[in-house]
Amino acid sequence: MKALFHLVGAGTDINSSFERGAALAPPLIRQALWSDRGNLACENGMEVGRDFTLEDRGDLPLGEDPEDDILIRNAVAASLTGGAIPILLGGDHAVTLPIMEAIHAHYGPVTILHIDAHPDLYEDFEGNPRSHASPFARIMEAGLAARLVQVGIRTLNRHCREQAERFGVEIVEMRHFAPDRIPHISGPVYISLDMDGLDPACAPGVSHAEPGGLTVRELLSVLDGISGEIVGADIVEFNPRFDINGVTAITAAKMIREIASRAATNRKGKS
Ligand code: MN
Ligand code: MN
């Protein structure tokens, strides 16, 4: 059976600020995914390996230099050309820019569903325009997305509010969150999941813990509302240095299964 999904590790801290550690995430998420602790069932009844295949393509040999973007772009392009849906494991959130460059080259502008405590829209952060606090400013400037829908946001300062207005970002602020408040997304969608979008009680292993976030159940209801074709996804910003009992790794692994089963369902509906 040809793999419907490619799992690709993109562990890097090159654009992290404040804390390093996201580079250590991919092997731990993988370990949690394949661990005998749980089975490979998804909540909709699909099973990894039975209803769809997920091929683990290993970790990209990132060296924390500018060449990394090329490696990430090429890996995503190779998956898309082969007909697979890439699921990237970060790494800091800046990896989403080269991923979206490859997605755009293949599909043109798609909608991004971005789950995060932070809007990541800084013009630059501490002098770094490629900061993990800025990828969505770069993505929107370059016209790589048709729409940017952000969910879980609870750290909007004046600068980022202005940036959101400038780029026409559709934000469901966490203080107003309800699953039915998420704008309808038609057509192809890319999912970018920053683990700090979840509440720190659900996902303590992050660099920028921000209280008042999504529960795992709320995040699942957000994913459940996606009816369009899912063209790719990333799970970023898990920082194992702050994890407790592996719970953030286990949650990230569950999100791989849940995103994949939703994507497999939506693709079936299309064909
Ligand atoms: Mn964040
Ligand atoms: Mn982020």
Image (cartoon, grey):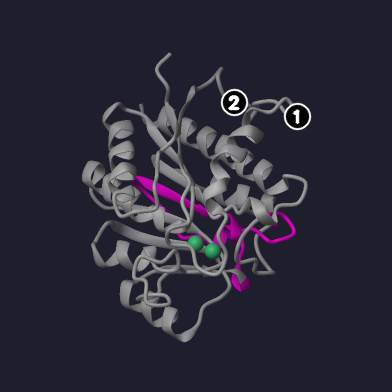
Using the image, determine if residue 85 lies above or below residue 163.
Answer: above
N-terminal of the two: label 1 or label 2? 1
Residue in the image at 56% along x and 52% along y: 222
Q: Dot 1, how many residues are within 10 Å of its Cα: few (below 14), some (14-19), or many (20+)?
A: few
Q: Quadrant of ligand 1?
A: bottom right
Residue 6 showing in the rendered view: yes
Residue 44 showing in the rendered view: no
| Span colored in magenta | 175-204
Quarter residue 188 falls in: top left
**114 relative position to 142: left or right:** right
Quarter residue 256 falls in: top right
Find out whether the residues at labels 1 and 2 contact each other: C-beta distance under 8 Å.
no
Identify which amino acid the numbered label 1 is placed on: Arg
Between 24 and 109, the one lying in front of the other is 24
Q: Which mark is residue 37?
A: 1
Residue 216, position as x, y percentages in the image: 68, 51
The kind of secondary structure element at disc 1 is: loop
Between 27 and 164, the one lying in front of the other is 27
**Magenta span has 98?**
no
Which quarter shows the N terminus?
A: top left
Which quarter shows the C terminus?
A: top left
Identify which amino acid the numbered label 2 is placed on: Met
Using the image, determine if residue 52 lies above or below residue 196.
Answer: above
The residue that disc 2 covers is: 46
| Image mark count | 2
**258 relative position to 202: left or right:** left
Label 1 CB-ligand 1 distance < 8 A: no
**Magenta span has 200?**
yes
Using the image, determine if residue 120 lies above or below residue 81.
Answer: below
